[in-house]
Image (spheres, rainbow, N blue to C red):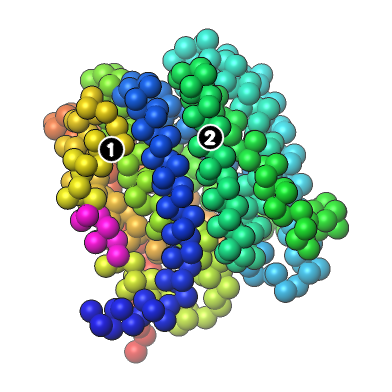
Amino acid sequence: MISFIKRLKSSNLLKIFSLTGISTIIKVITSYVTVKFLATIVGPAGIALIGQLQNFTTVLTALGAGGINNGVVKYVAEYKENHTTLRDILGNGFKITAYLSLIVGLIIIVLSKFLSELILLDGQYSYIFILFGISLFFISINNFFISVLNGYQEFRKFVIVNIITSVIGLLFTVGLVVLFNIRGALIAIVTYQAVIVFFTLIYVRKLHWFTKSFLWTAWNKKIVKRYAFYSLMTIVSAVTVPVAQVIIRKFLIHEYSITDAGYWESMNKISGLYLMLFTSTFSVYYLPKLSEIKEQLVLRKEILKTYKIFTPLLILSLLVIFLLKDFVVSVLFTPSFDPVKKLFLWQICGDFFKIMSWILAFVMVAKSMSKLYIITEISFAILQVVLTYFFVHYNGVIGAVQAYFVNYFIYFWTMALLFRNILVKNR
């Protein structure tokens, strides 16, 4: 215990964990208020509908940005001292983001009626997709600038931007829901990041890279090819999980009801809230750090250090959440959401193996292991859907979270097997 505390005090990872913790606490609070507000206004069925739209926007946002944001983080971290290469990295990245977001946005607008019927099960919501198509350019540019900050490891600036955007997102969402009920919630989902970009621009406008010479350079085939690997990885990741969730949600609606699907979606939202601190640290510290490392011995040391620090913190956090599940549900939702409490145990067990496996999975992203990453992402997304069909058939709605646990349990041991040469010290 004493040695663990000493490791915590001396670790840069803990410092970043604490720093991102400030941002994450603000984000958790704003997300809590948003979820509580939505749950009170729209109920379980509305939460299920909102989940459908959020999954769709996640997929299209990744496509609109060309899926290069993790690549931006990696290459900025790797070449931040080489301004010549960095100009090509940023200039080509910005062009890819701008052009693709405009093209994908136009396609969304043209197909708005079809998408409304497909995603929201009603053609009357076509205006939501028109607004999303218009907003996509601004959302993509915002995410690009935040990725650059992340790559520079400007942690304090990154935290400040995230705090500001969280507060703005909360005010924007609450305002629209008050005015337009569930329609306002749907509008907020597809537009709030488009509003946030203007505040991000104010914050980054004086940074040395925010100039035409950095953000609008000639096309470089070599750089575009490098980004292509990240596009494949990010797009596959952004598509597989949300699509799997859409399939599972529709299956639950068909087999049971939209309300039962809403309980499952609510459990996902709770999970997302308490895991946000860990996943934020991965993006802000861990990915840039892994990208900088060249030697396998140093890489192994960084991975094991992360496990030594994160494992006890994660176990403690999940245990507290489980013991306080009644309180969590009552605070976040309304009495109509009480059935969600039955889903906690399996979800929390799945979350443990999810984070444990991500510590290794991020190595694939940092080291551009695109083929392996794509194969594992697709395989385990399919496996989760198959497991869900099987467990739900025999155990009801709780089977969806049982399938989640089994899927990530297998995923963790698969990652451990794939990276055993790094984990086990060579004699």
- For the point 39% across and 63% down, the residue is 359
> Vertical placement of 81 versus 364: above or below?
below
Q: Residue 331 carries which label?
A: 1
Residue 391 shows in the view: no
Disc 2 residue type? Answer: Leu
Q: Which mark is residue 171?
A: 2
> Vertical placement of 103 versus 376: above or below?
above
Q: Provide residue 336's location: percent of width, then percent of height.
A: 23, 24
Indicate yes or no whether the magenta region holds residue 232.
no
| Residue 196 or residue 262, whichever sits in front | 196
State the extent of the magenta-drawn residues as a range. 313-320
- In this view, the residue farthest toward the bottom is 427
Q: In the image, is 15 to the left or to the right of 133?
A: left
- For the point 17% across and 50% down, the residue is 323
Q: In the image, is 325 to the left or to the right of 135?
A: left
- For the point 44% across and 15% down, the residue is 121
> Vertical placement of 188 versus 87: above or below?
above
Element class at badge 1:
helix
Indicate yes or no whether the magenta region holds residue 315.
yes
